[in-house]
Image (tube, rainbow, N blue to C red):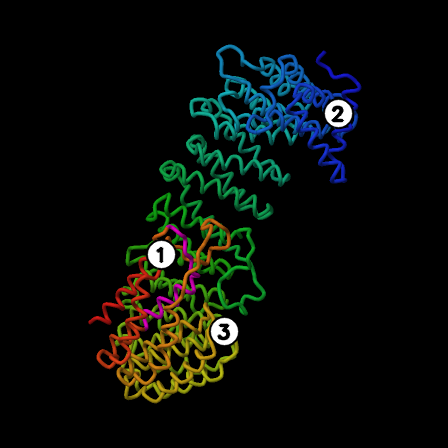
């Protein structure tokens, strides 16, 4: 007898209830019994679950039966029992599943039963010219469900076919064949929201999983399907789900949308992207559809009239939705708040790059500049910000000089904007363009850019003033001395007061700007030396708090750069003062990763370059610490794949053991080797008293188990010693 008896069902109900018990011991024992039944009597297990699914009045038992039956009938699971059950049980279970689909009143249980049917059917159905083998009743059952007067059954039928497409597309083709078009025609304009949604999802799944030959007959439905998607707007969840599905299908089969791209798909997706009444995630997904289809079929999209113009305009419109941040002026960087959800601004910015790569940078750039000019004259500061931020995206990719000229023209015009975030972004563009297009920018546009930067170094907002200094540092890297010299008096007069700023970050950026000037004009710095050096010495003496260590390090570096610029005679006494403070600071210990540590190492090398043999008196105090950095010993790493090793450099020793050093230790090793090499190069024969001890340390360093570039540094220092 296939149907289990009352006693068998009673025992099985007790087992299911025990599986839900809050008592750990009872629940664990019931799990063992259930697993044993799966292995020893899968027929009884499946029959009991099937009967409870269709006959129990208890919704909890029906839900549990649906979940467990779904697990048992999923071919990819280790506990898949179908091959072990008898033919009679198989017929019974299939019949009960279809009965449940037709009769189950609760939505969530129907969904679970539908999942079980889709998984089992995908396993059983083999493509055949006649009827699907393994479950011949399925074809008629699916037709009955989808053509039913009951919207719940229509939804179930569509959902099963859609799910099967994601598991075994050939099985679906065998199951419904040419009926797929008829099913979609029947249901995509259904009065029931859930049926409409499943019809759209089925259409998208067909484009994603079937072959072009199989989905080609469906393409005539594209305009009405997209209209349905648009009409789902009031139901945010279903709307987003459908947009996501058609976007995934556009990634796989973008050519499926070619016929109706211009007349329906592009206008609809653009309109949805712009509809501010909708949620951000819906709007972003609509825009993602356009980006995906452009990525998958760029030539098709380029040939579509208005496509490129529309998507570029959308990019700027999204970027114009930058969020107001009450504390923006108090921040010291452009880092976000840590929100994992991309903002509309982020999406617009990212898509500028994507469209430039897929649709051709030349056409996209022309449209970007056209839109940027329009946005730059908007009364809305967010539009002006979008204009200049878009130029920042372009600065990395433009090649033609005329585009660089236009970037400069627009950016300089916005340096005097009323809104600080626009001024800040204009500075950012100029600083970035200075790096990407040097020396052209410096040679051609210094007269326009430098006065604007100097003006903003005095901006009332420290964040803008600091960014003006940072942009100047980028700009100055490729400046010729004769170009910068006329601006130096004004620059020094502007920057020196900022060295006493209350804002820590602003002081640090001003120090960096002065260092950049020193590197460019070198000996021409002498007239300004006494104006600047006392202020830097004041910083290193008073900036002793933990949060001021980076500022102090920058001051040491700036002093050393000025020393190289003006020469030993001018720098001698200040160098002695700087070295004394640096040695005292180092003697108190500097932790790995301390920003002051690297700054002192760099500054010591430059002071050596400036003082030459007059640097010798400092070696006895410096060298022991440097030697100690070279005696770092790696630790053996038992499992190189283990977590928590992200901050380590791993190498293999000759015996096959994995050895590890923290990144900070490797950086210290490199710094120590560079310092020794510098001292030997600069001091030459004056270094003779330290050669023997240095040689012993460097010999050990040559065997340092680290990256090739680190070993090359050590070898270079050794060769310098030999010479």
Q: Secondary structure at mark 1?
A: loop
| Circle 1 residues within 10 Å: few <14, some 14–19, many ≥20 | some
Which stretch is magenta?
656-675
Please, is residue 132 above or below residue 448 in the view?
above
Q: Earlier in the sequence, mark 2 or mark 1?
A: 2
Residue 150 picture location, percent across and down:
69, 22
Looking at this rendering, what residue extends furthest in the left direction?
723
Q: Which label number is shown at residue 12?
A: 2
Q: Is residue 296 magenta?
A: no
Which residue is more in the foreground, 49 or 457? 49
Please, is residue 57 above or below residue 362 in the view?
above
Q: Quadrant of the C terminus?
A: bottom left
Residue 378 picture location, percent across and down:
48, 59
The residue carrying mark 3 is 462
Please, is residue 128 above or below residue 473 in the view?
above
Label 2 close to label 1 by CB (< 8 Å): no
Q: Quadrant of the N terminus?
A: top right
């Amino acid at each position: 007898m296939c149907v289990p008896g009352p006693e068998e069902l009673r025992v099985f109900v007790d087992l299911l209830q025990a599986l839900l018990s809050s008592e750990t011991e009872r629940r664990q024992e019931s799990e063992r019994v259930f697993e044993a039944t799966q292995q020893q009597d899968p027929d009884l297990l499946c029959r009991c679950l099937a009967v409870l699914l269709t006959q129990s009045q208890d919704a909890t038992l029906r839900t549990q039966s649906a979940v467990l039956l779904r697990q048992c009938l999923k071919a990819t699971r280790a506990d898949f029992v179908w091959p072990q059950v008898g033919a009679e049980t198989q017929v019974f279970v299939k019949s009960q599943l279809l009965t449940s689909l037709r009769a189950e009143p609760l939505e969530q249980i129907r969904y679970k039963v539908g999942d079980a049917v889709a998984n089992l059917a995908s396993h059983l159905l083999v493509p055949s010219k006649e009827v699907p083998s393994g479950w011949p009743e399925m074809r008629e059952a699916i037709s009955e469900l989808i053509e039913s007067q009951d919207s719940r059954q229509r939804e179930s039928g569509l959902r099963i076919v859609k799910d099967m497409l994601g598991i075994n597309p050939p099985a679906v083709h065998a199951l419904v064949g040419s009926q797929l078009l008829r099913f979609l025609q029947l249901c995509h304009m259904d009065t029931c929201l859930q049926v409409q949604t499943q019809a759209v999802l089925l259409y998208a799944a067909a484009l994603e999983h079937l072959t072009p030959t199989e989905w080609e007959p469906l393409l005539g439905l594209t305009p009405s399907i997209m209209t349905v998607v648009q009409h789902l707007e009031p139901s945010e969840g279903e709307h987003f789900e459908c947009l996501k599905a058609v976007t995934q299908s556009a990634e796989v089969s973008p050519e499926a949308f070619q016929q109706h791209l211009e007349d329906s798909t592009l206008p609809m997706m653009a309109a949805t992207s712009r509809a501010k009444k909708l949620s951000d995630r819906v709007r972003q997904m609509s825009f993602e559809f356009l980006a995906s289809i452009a990525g998958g079929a760029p030539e098709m999209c380029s040939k579509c009239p208005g496509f490129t113009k529309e998507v570029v305009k959308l990019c700027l419109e999204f970027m114009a939705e930058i969020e107001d941040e009450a504390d923006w002026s108090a921040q010291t960087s452009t880092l976000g708040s840590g929100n994992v959800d991309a903002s509309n601004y982020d999406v617009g910015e990212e898509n500028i790059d994507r469209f430039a790569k897929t649709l051709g940078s030349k056409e996209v750039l022309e449209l970007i500049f056209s839109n940027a000019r329009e946005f730059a004259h908007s009364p809305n500061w967010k539009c002006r910000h979008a204009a200049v931020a878009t130029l920042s995206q372009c600065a990395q990719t433009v090649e033609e000089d005329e585009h660089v000229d236009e970037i400069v023209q627009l950016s300089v015009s916005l340096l005097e904007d009323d809104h600080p975030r626009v001024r800040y972004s204009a500075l950012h563009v100029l600083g970035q363009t200075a790096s990407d297009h040097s020396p052209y920018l410096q040679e051609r546009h210094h007269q326009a850019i430098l006065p604007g930067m100097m003006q903003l170094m005095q901006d009332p907002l420290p964040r803008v003033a600091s960014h003006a200094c940072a942009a100047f540092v980028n700009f100055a890297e490729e400046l010729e001395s004769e170009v910068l010299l006329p601006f130096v008096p004004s620059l020094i007069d502007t920057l020196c007061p900022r060295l006493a700023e209350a804002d820590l970050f602003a002081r640090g950026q001003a120090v960096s700007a002065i260092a950049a000037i020193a590197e460019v004009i070198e000996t021409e710095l002498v007239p300004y030396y006494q104006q600047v050096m006392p202020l830097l010495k004041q910083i290193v003496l008073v900036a002793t708090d933990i949060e001021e260590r980076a500022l102090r390090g920058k001051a040491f570096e700036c002093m050393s750069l000025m020393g190289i610029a003006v020469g030993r005679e001018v720098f001698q006494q200040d160098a002695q003062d700087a070295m004394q403070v640096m040695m005292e600071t180092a003697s108190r210990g500097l932790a790995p990763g301390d920003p002051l540590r690297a700054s002192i190492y760099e500054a010591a090398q430059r002071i050596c370059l400036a003082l030459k043999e007059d640097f010798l008196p400092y070696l006895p105090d410096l060298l022991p610490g440097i030697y100690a950095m070279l005696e770092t010993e790696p630790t053996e790493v038992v499992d190189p794949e283990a977590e928590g090793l992200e901050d380590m450099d791993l190498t293999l020793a000759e015996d096959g053991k994995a050895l590890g050093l923290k990144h900070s230790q490797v950086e210290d090793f490199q710094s120590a080797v560079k310092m020794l090499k510098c001292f030997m190069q600069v001091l030459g024969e004056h270094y003779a008293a330290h050669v023997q001890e240095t040689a012993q340390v460097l010999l050990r360093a040559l065997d340092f188990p680290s990256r090739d570039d680190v070993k090359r540094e050590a070898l270079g220092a050794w060769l310098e010693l030999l010479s």
